[in-house]
Amino acid sequence: MQAKKRYLILLSAGVCLSLLFYFGGLQVRATRRNPNRREDHSRNGLHSGPDQTWPHFSDHLQPFMPWDQLENEDYNVHISPKQKRDANASIYKGKRCRMESCFDFSICKKNGFKVYTYPQQKGEKISESYQNILSAIETSRFYTSDPSQACLFVLSLDTLDRDQLSPQYVHSLKTKVQNLHLWNNGRNHLIFNLYSGTWPDYTEDLGFDIGQAMLAKASIGTENFRPHFDVSIPLFSKDHPRTGGDRGYLKFNTIPPFRKYMLVFKGKRYLTGIGSDTRNALYHVHNAEDVVLLTTCKHGKDWQKHKDARCDKDNAEYDKYDYREMLHNATFCLAPRGRRLGSFRFLEALQAACVPVMLSNGWELPFSEVIDWNTAAVIGDERLLLQIPSTVRSIHQDKILALRQQTQFLWEAYFSSVEKIVLTTLEIIQDRIFKHISRNSLLWNSHPGALFALPQYSAYLGDFPFYYADLGIKPSTKFTAVIHAVTPLVSQSQPILKLLVAVSKSQYCAQIVVLWNCDKPLPAKHRWPPTSVPVIVIEGENKIMGSRFQPYDTILTDAILSLDEDTVLSTTEVDFAFTVWQSFPERIVGYPARSHFWDSNKERWGYTSKWTNDYSMVLTGAAIYHRYYHYLYTNYLPASLKNMVDQLANCEDILMNFLVSAVTKLPPIKVTQKKQYKETMMGQSSRASRWADPDHFAQRQTCMNKFANWFGTMPLIHSQMRLDPVLFKDQVSILRKKYRDIERL
């Protein structure tokens, strides 16, 4: 028995020795075949030896570098063949770029958000659309002509159309861009593009290496879109207005919100190639009643060579309908992809208050980083085309009304002109850079929009005049009176002293600020009458007219009662005007009203002070408005308009009305006032009074047209509404009326 055990032990030992020699020999042979293997491990920081059994990572961590820029074979060995092919294509250059890795924040935080456009080079052709983009930047508050102050750089080389078959295509762009001395591999550069690629594939290749530059691109796909780095912009035509732009077509809401057609489309049909599948299938859904989807293959030089059996029938049906009539009488408008992901139908539907139904899989919608498109469009799936009619029919009428209203807001806020598209792009980038004061979703997706809600003013929505209802709060219960003084104080009977006493007696007055824009020294304190509220006298900045709209820190209330020194108002009139403003805090509320009109003989805008049944301006000589408009006047309007006002010492009240109406899309509000106001103002004998200047009226006519030209449209809106106190002029006892003194004036 013991002999048997010894035999088994010896046998086991023999087998173990045999296996040891066998595997040891294999290892020796493998080492001889690959003598560099140990060196490879050592190079990668992995040392396997008897004196070191654990991996040792001796190399320092390398700084971030996009994988397409790495040339080390040890990295490329882990990249798939497809990735290797993509790495060689310019479309994928810097695909992993983000703000944190491919953008220099330091120069922006040093000088603020300033944008520099390269000087235009002689002999370089620039399309009208790209010229409009450059003009929008150069007339904006972001522009700087000094590249050392710039945070962002925009090329003067036209990059909008990169279709090699297009007459607008710029050749040798790769060399021209690389020769720019500020290019720096595209760092802190922004490239605008509407068309990329060419027939038959229409890829998103721009034909040159964009390096680390950001793209503001139309028809960009989600696969190539770099989130929070690129900006998706809408495709717009060469006829898109540079500034202003037409308002949306929704004039009034209809209940229920249904129109003649439920769903419409009219456009080209592609018989072959990319983008043809969806449009070729639209005839399956068309019923010629409330779903009218029309296509034509009659386009291009050789369309007859490729036409199919449906072409003649489709072309005949296509010619029966007027596109504009369909657009204005449809509830939903189909926006299928064309050769590229985006199409002109998208903006056309927005303007017409026709809810867009998107059929373009993989399209990064315009300004998707900040705009919630679920509140203004229906996002469909090309693969589920046959379900689209039943889907839109199932949308409740309340939802349709909300979608339609949002299309109008988005169109007017961000898409109605090239200028707004460019400024929206720049504001998005600015929000990325200065995240601590960036706008939230509510500012972007509610009236008046992010272009007019400057986050530098305040981070709290309650400090703006537009969001009281959304926040469930009420406007301020007090106001600050700002009296603009331009004549010296020589008599105790001057109108300014009487005005100061009347205003100080108002139960809503918190303080009075006298803005001393007179060339004479400040009067002594004892010259001012005693009041129950603080009176602060400050000197105007450079004694210019625009200084009355400076955002002074001494103004502590949201409401400002703006007054000229020769204004004649009673305490009762001040109280009533303020109570009206509390119900309309986003508007100008006041007494002296003026109007504008179009002079067809002179083909220009006219200004009138005639007392008629309508008005479009309330002069700031006796008006209440929110103090945010002081900040907007100072920081939003261009220096050219403000300088014009200061040089003329005139028109500042007109410019403020233009600004507020452009923001609110609403007219000001006139309140009850004694008729003697006009005669009192016109009868002022002071030499400094603007009413005594014979050129005053002519200058205001000129201002109207200069301002309208900059805004790109006429923002002023006529109104016939006048708000009076309850029981005003009614044949009842005066004791039953709250504002009794107004009746006696």
Image: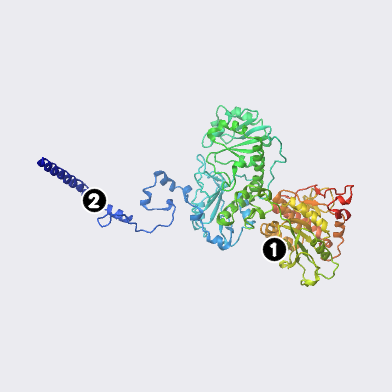
On the image, numbered disc 2 is attached to which residue?
31
Residue 455 lies in quadrant = bottom right
Q: Viewed as shown, does residue 650 lie left or right of 316?
A: right
Front one among 419 and 553:
553
- Residue type at numbered disc 2: Thr
Looking at the rendered image, the quarter that the C terminus falls into is bottom right
> Measured from the top left, where is residue 421 in percent x and y?
62, 49
Front one among 560 and 150:
560
Mark 2 Cα-neighbour bin, 10 Å: few <14, some 14–19, many ≥20:
few
Mark 1 Cα-neighbour bin, 10 Å: few <14, some 14–19, many ≥20:
some
Of helix, strand and loop, which one carries label 2?
Answer: helix
Residue 550 lies in quadrant = bottom right
- Residue type at numbered disc 1: Tyr
> Measured from the top left, where is residue 345 in percent x and y?
61, 39
On the image, numbered disc 1 is attached to which residue?
552
Q: CA distance from mark 1 to mark 2?
A: 81 Å
> Measured from the top left, where is residue 135 in percent x and y?
63, 54
Of helix, strand and loop, which one carries label 1?
Answer: loop
Circles 1 and 2 in contact, beta carbons < 8 Å = no
Is residue 523 visible in the rendered image? The answer is: no
| Residue farthest along the front direction in this orientation | 1
> Measured from the top left, where is residue 267 in percent x and y?
61, 35
Name the residue: 62% across, 49% down.
Answer: 442
